[in-house]
Amino acid sequence: MRRHRKRAHQGELDFRSWGGPRRGAGPKRAGSRDRVPHRTREALSDRHPVHVTVRLHEGLPNLRRDAARAAIERSFRVASGRFGFRLAQYSLQSNHVHLIAEAEDEDALSRGMQGLLVRVARALNRLWARSGSVFSDRFHARQLRTPREVRSALVYVLKNASHHGLRILGIDPFSSGPWFDGWNRDSTVDRPFPGAAARSWLLRIGWRRHGLIRLDERPRAASP
């Protein structure tokens, strides 16, 4: 007797999160960036922040526009602290999003990311007057285990626009940088923070052992 696997309904978002079988597994076309290689993910500790990357499908509008930023920020405010998942920092690039988050375990990360990205996808589809999936396949997640790893990830995420060759004077407005309190200078913003306060020692305190982040600092190494 053939067994049928149950599939969770994910609305407008078509991606697989923390492991599991998926349609279209197997060799991919060379050069395609639509899919993250399928691997069994390691167990996630709530002591370790996570650097998450998720990409748009090809051909969609640029996320670095004021209207898209506003729609995404509204979605983040609603969904950033649910299911044992907390979105602490982020940056929006033209065709992908970087997040630094905390989660109680891998299930909380999967559920939190699913809820977050479904809400973002719906908001962007309304803005763009379209329907269908927005994000490509699975998200990529990497645990950050040491203060140095967390600091490097913060630099990479908050300074990601300069990593891609964009000239940014000061703090990138398409990121959580305006609310970030770890710069080596003061920053103020009059909009409410569209994320959740970090709870882990590494993301609150530990990374600061290696110094506050300079506005002219650039990422030193590639990251997911």
Image (cartoon, rainbow, N blue to C red):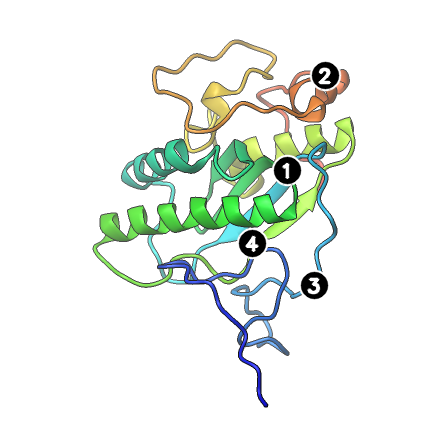
| Res. 197 in view | yes
Residue under pointer 4: 139
Q: Secondary structure at mark 1?
A: loop
Q: Position of residue 213 (x, y in %)?
A: 64, 20
In three-dimensional space, the C-alpha distance between marks 2 and 1, rounded to whole angstroms, equals: 27 Å
Q: Three-letter amino acid code at disc 4?
A: Phe
Q: Secondary structure at mark 4?
A: loop
Residue at 28% from the left image edge and 53% from the top image edge: 125
Q: What is the crowding at mark 1: few (fewer than 14 residues within 10 Å), some, or many (at least 20)?
A: some
Relative to 171, residue 73 above or below:
below
Q: Which quadrant does the N terminus fall into? A: bottom right
Residue at 71% from the left image edge and 35% from the top image edge: 48
Q: Nearer the viewer, mark 3 or mark 1?
A: 1
Q: Three-letter amino acid code at disc 2?
A: Gly
Query: Which badge, 3 or 1, comes first in the chain's sequence?
Result: 3
Q: What is the crowding at mark 2: few (fewer than 14 residues within 10 Å), some, or many (at least 20)?
A: few
Occupied quadrant, residue 51: top right
